[in-house]
Amino acid sequence: MNKLQFKPELSPKKMLEFGVFGGWYFEKKFDEYPALWFKKAKISDFGFNAELNYFGISAGLTKAEWERKGWIHAKDPLGWFQWYCRYTMGRRLDKIDKVQIARWHAFGPRHIGGIKKNCDKGDLSCRKKQRQSLLQWGYNPFF
C-alpha cells in the first residue's frame, strides 16, 4: 500500500471539533498533540459522553474489543486515531503505517456505500451510527 494513497478528508483537529469518541479518546492526556487541536474540540471531563459525538450517539467498538481483535499496537496503545494523529504530526513507522492505512481503506468504502444505497442525499438522520463511524475514521460523513 502506497502512503500517498492515504488522504483522509478530515484532519484530527476537525474531527475533534465535530465530536468523536465521546470526547474521551485521549482521557484528557493531550500533551503530545498541538494545543490548537483542542481549542474548539468537544472534550469530556468525566469519561465517554455520546452526546459530545457529532451525531449524538455511540458508534464503534470498545477498546477491549479492539484489543481482542488485535487492532491495538504497542506503539499506539489507544488505537487507530492515536496512530492517525501521530502520522499527521509526521511520525512514520512503515510496517504499522501500512497496516493502519489498509484498515482505513477497508473501512470507508463499505460504510459510504451502505449510506448511499439506503439514504436520501443529505439526510444526515439516516444511518447516524455509520456516519459517526466514518467521522471517527477521518471520512466526511456529510453527503
Image (cartoon, rainbow, N blue to C red):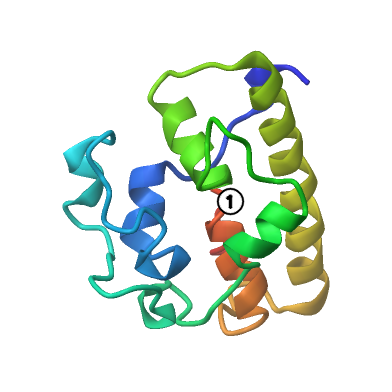
**Where is mark 1, residue-wise?**
137
- List x then y, in percent, for residue 122: 58, 73
13 vs 49: above or below: above
Instruction: Please tell me which residue is depicted at 76% across the width and 34% down the height of the picture.
Output: 102
Q: Quadrant of residue 34?
A: top left
Instruction: Please tell me which residue is depicted at 52% across the width and 42% down the height of the picture.
Output: 77
100 left or right of 84 in image = right
37 vs 22: above or below: above
42 left or right of 58 in image = left
Q: Which quadrant does the C terminus fall into? A: bottom right
Pick whichever, 21 or 116, lies toward us: 21
Instruction: Please tell me which residue is depicted at 37% across the width and 62% down the height of the picture.
Output: 18
- List x then y, in percent, for residue 1: 78, 21
- List x then y, in percent, for residue 126: 65, 82
Q: Amino acid at mark 1?
A: Trp
Q: Quadrant of residue 63?
A: bottom right
Pick whichever, 111 or 99, lies toward us: 99
**Residue neighbourhood size for the residue with mark 1, other residues' Cα within 10 Å, grouped as few (<14), some (14–19), many (≥20):** many
- List x then y, in percent, for residue 86: 43, 30
